[in-house]
Amino acid sequence: MSASEVTKAARLSVAPMMDWTDRHCRYFHRLMTQKTLLYTEMVTAPAIIHGDRDRLLGFDAAEHPVAIQLGGSDPAQLAEAARIAEGFGYDEVNLNCGCPSDRVQSGSFGAVLMETPALVAECVNAMRAAVSIPVTVKCRIGVDDQMPEEVLPDFLAQVSAAGVDRFAIHARKAWLQGLSPKENRDIPPLNYDLVMDMKGLFPHLHLSVNGGIATLDAAEDFLGRGLDGVMIGRAAYHVPADILLDADRRIFGCDDAPSAEEVVHLMLPYISRHIANGGKLGQITRHMLGLFQGRPGARGWRRHLSENAHRDGAGPDVVLAALGFVTRAAA
């Protein structure tokens, strides 16, 4: 996939989310939207270099366009990890400068990199030299006592000077001291206006906004106000049908989205292959629990999957039985 095609896909993206956006989640999401850019969970550069690459990096070809997010702060390691990821077929490599977890801080990467834009520039420069696919950055507006109005434009200026022209900006500070990672997703106030100001300061950059965006209406509003892209996280996971089933039509101008019921049937061959290869049903269906959120029968769907997907021998029949709660309620 060409860089320009990946950039077009970034008009709407599903955020990288630890423990959530694994390969099964992405395959499920791809059935609902053919155009939206999907991201992996963050994978650390050392893990890719020294770990089980097939387990960490493997994905289904149907997931394209798909980007990998890397964690790290060593330019040489990040360059090597990016090269390996490109060899696996990813369409983009993204550097995490926004995750506030303790583990990330102790490794001197994630949101703490907002404090060292020169190092980030060095990292992305090394990554760009190692790969031909786009290198992008996901960041916060600042950390701790930093003044975002001063820090963010300086960060964008230094990192873009190293050749990055696409950024996803989580419109919150990260408080590295005093707040948990979960609290960092909700408590620091959102500052969308600052992200809009950055588009005015850097009109040549492709800027996506992230954080607290829960509807396609909100996404369309940001795009209408001049931003280049919108990245949606938890809403795309918890109510995927509300976000993704209509995304191709509303955001990309395409038609022919499947229904939520059709998505379930489209998942069945994938589920069968996974189980035949030794996988467990629950590894997939945990991502599907919110598919019918807000619809009659949704509670029965969730309950049946939650209670039965972990059982020995559970397979597509469990999913079809769960779907019956929805179809009977709609009859």
Image (spheres, rainbow, N blue to C red):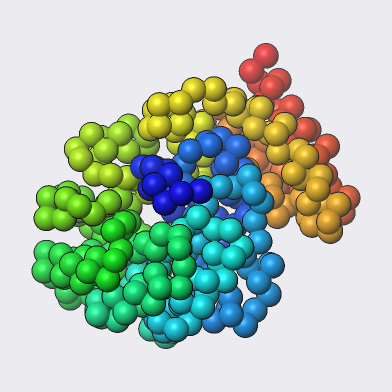
Work out whether residue 225 or residue 176 is closer to the camera in this orientation and state it.
Answer: 225
**Residue occupying image coordinates x 18% and y 67%:** 157
Give whichever of 156, 290 is nearer the camera: 156
In the image: residue 58, left or right of residue 153: right
Can you say whether 268 is above or below 281 in the image?
A: above
Q: In this view, does 156 lie to the left or right of 112?
A: left
Q: Position of residue 24 (x, y in %)?
A: 65, 51
Q: Which residue is drawn at 65% across and 27% down?
A: 261
Res. 48 image quadrant: bottom right
Q: Tell me what residue is drawn at x 64 percent, y 56 percent.
A: 59
* Picture quadrant of residue 181: bottom left
Query: Which quadrant holds the C terminus?
Result: top right
Identify whether 127 is placed above or below 137. Answer: below
The x and y percentages for residue 292 are 58, 33
Name the foreground residue: 83 vs 117: 83
Is residue 41 at all visible to an observer of this figure? no
Front-lying residue, 241 or 24: 24
Residue 320 visible in the snapshot: yes
Is 10 located above or below residue 101 in the figure? Answer: above
Q: How many marks?
A: 0
Q: Position of residue 214 (x, y in %)?
A: 37, 41
- As drawn, which residue projects farthest toward the right? 313
Expressed as whole percent of the image width and height from the top left, the position of residue 304 reads 73, 40
Q: Residue at the spot x=17%, y=74% of the render? A: 146
Taking 284 as reference, is 101 left or right? left
